[in-house]
Image (cartoon, rainbow, N blue to C red):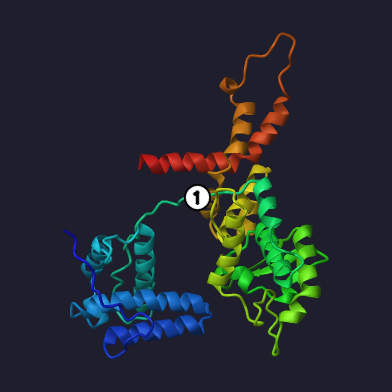
């Protein structure tokens, strides 16, 4: 039977620098701050390195030089066998999240000559499945959700503007929270998004979303804002920025109220936007730019749900997918078919890559 981890919560919020290993972790986190990593990234690194430090301390490991490749493999195995109080294991995604900062920490130690060799140099992170979103909204369902906020009330106008922004741009929850008034360019129909890892991007935003944001700016935000006003676009009734949980509650509440048999919140609109663009014929690289994905493989998760478009291309291009032609009926233009097939090349390539992964 697998052993449970320590019931005592790891010291993750504050790093104990009384031992050598902890002092180096503190310096590493300080370096991340100095090099302009986001506060959220540093916090996550602190939490997950805190777990590792606790594990090391319980085994008498107090210096970087005492952590060998074999020690890291033991830690990885411990994460795999760990069971919470309810008996559930850590998901492979969670295991990877805990190991990645450890790998980055030892890379920094080696690069700065604090250790002779990097024990984590060939530490392989667990592979985990990119799960498809549980639900995707149809166009009709989107309209049902959009119609629910009471736009005769000030918070209803705010909520409608939030939902429209999510669906139009597919931005992440934290990206919407950090939007400023001046990030929106109404004339050009674009918005500056402050993405993960401080990677900003300018993306289009639909006219309908802009109309609702402008109505919110004119009629609602002046009544919510308090001095000093830092320019955050969407505010609570207390004039503060929305918290992530509060934003999820707002979006999720309208999805449930629509009674469409589907659940979800902020990411539901992100998934829906990506899927609708792909099904509408958008090249995957344009969707990649909209979503702010650094790697095309991340965006390809969304191509798996675009079965309607794939079915259309399959019917038009696969000889066995169409009924026999009647006498006198002509084939569709070969050039037209080829052109449409090329437009979905990225989708088909993604499916081929998935088949290769399954074989492995």
In this rendering, position of residue 95 left or right of residue 241: left
> At 67% across and 31% down in the image, what residue appears?
338
Q: How many marks?
A: 1
Q: Quadrant of the C terminus?
A: top left
Q: Which x, y percent locates residue 149?
A: 69, 62
Q: Residue furthest right?
A: 187
Using the rendered view, name the quadrant where residue 60 is placed. Answer: bottom left
State the residue in front, 64 or 41: 41
- Seen in the picture, residue 14 relative to 55 is either above or below; the reply is below
**In this view of the protein, can residue 190 be seen by the observer?**
yes
> At 50% across and 76% down in the image, what residue appears?
40
State the residue in front, 67 or 233: 233
Q: Quadrant of the N terminus?
A: bottom left
- Seen in the picture, residue 177 relative to 30 is either above or below; the reply is above
State the residue in front, 1 or 238: 238
**In this view of the protein, can residue 292 be seen by the observer?**
no
State the residue in front, 65 or 161: 161
Residue placed under numbered mark 1 in the picture: 134
Q: Residue furthest left?
A: 1
Using the rendered view, name the quadrant where residue 70 is placed. Answer: bottom left
């Amino acid at each position: 039977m697998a052993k449970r981890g320590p019931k005592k919560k790891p010291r993750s919020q504050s790093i104990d620098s009384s031992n050598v290993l902890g002092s180096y972790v503190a310096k590493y986190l300080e370096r991340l701050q100095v090099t302009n990593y986001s506060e959220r990234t540093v916090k996550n690194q602190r939490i997950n390195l805190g777990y590792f430090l606790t594990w090391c301390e319980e085994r008498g490991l107090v210096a970087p030089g005492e952590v060998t490749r074999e020690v890291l493999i033991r830690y990885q195995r411990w994460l795999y066998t760990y069971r919470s109080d309810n008996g559930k294991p850590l998901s492979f995604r969670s295991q990877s999240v805990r190991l990645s900062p450890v790998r980055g920490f030892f890379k920094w130690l080696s690069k700065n000559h604090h250790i002779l060799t990097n024990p984590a140099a060939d530490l392989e992170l667990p592979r985990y499945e990119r799960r498809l979103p549980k639900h995707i909204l149809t166009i009709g369902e989107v309209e049902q959700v959009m119609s629910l906020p009471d736009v005769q009330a000030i918070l209803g106008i705010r909520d409608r503007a939030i939902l429209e922004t999510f669906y139009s741009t597919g931005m992440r929850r934290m990206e919407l929270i950090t939007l400023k008034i001046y990030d929106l360019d109404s004339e050009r129909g674009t918005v500056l998004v402050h993405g993960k890892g401080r990677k900003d991007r300018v993306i289009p935003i639909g006219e309908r979303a802009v109309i609702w944001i402008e109505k919110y700016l004119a009629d609602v935000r002046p009544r919510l804002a308090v001095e000093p006003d830092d320019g955050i676009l969407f505010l609570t009734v207390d004039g503060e920025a929305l918290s992530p949980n509060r934003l999820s509650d707002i979006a999720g509440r309208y999805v449930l109220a629509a009674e469409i048999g589907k659940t979800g919140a902020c990411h539901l609109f992100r998934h829906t936007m990506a899927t609708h663009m792909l099904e509408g014929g958008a090249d995957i690289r344009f969707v990649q730019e909209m979503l702010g994905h650094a790697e095309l493989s991340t965006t390809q998760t969304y191509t798996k749900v675009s079965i309607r478009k794939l079915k259309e291309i399959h019917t038009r291009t696969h000889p066995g997918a169409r009924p026999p032609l009647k006498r006198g009926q002509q084939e569709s233009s070969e050039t037209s078919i080829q052109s449409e097939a090329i437009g979905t090349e990225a989708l088909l390539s993604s499916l081929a890559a998935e088949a290769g992964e399954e074989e492995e």
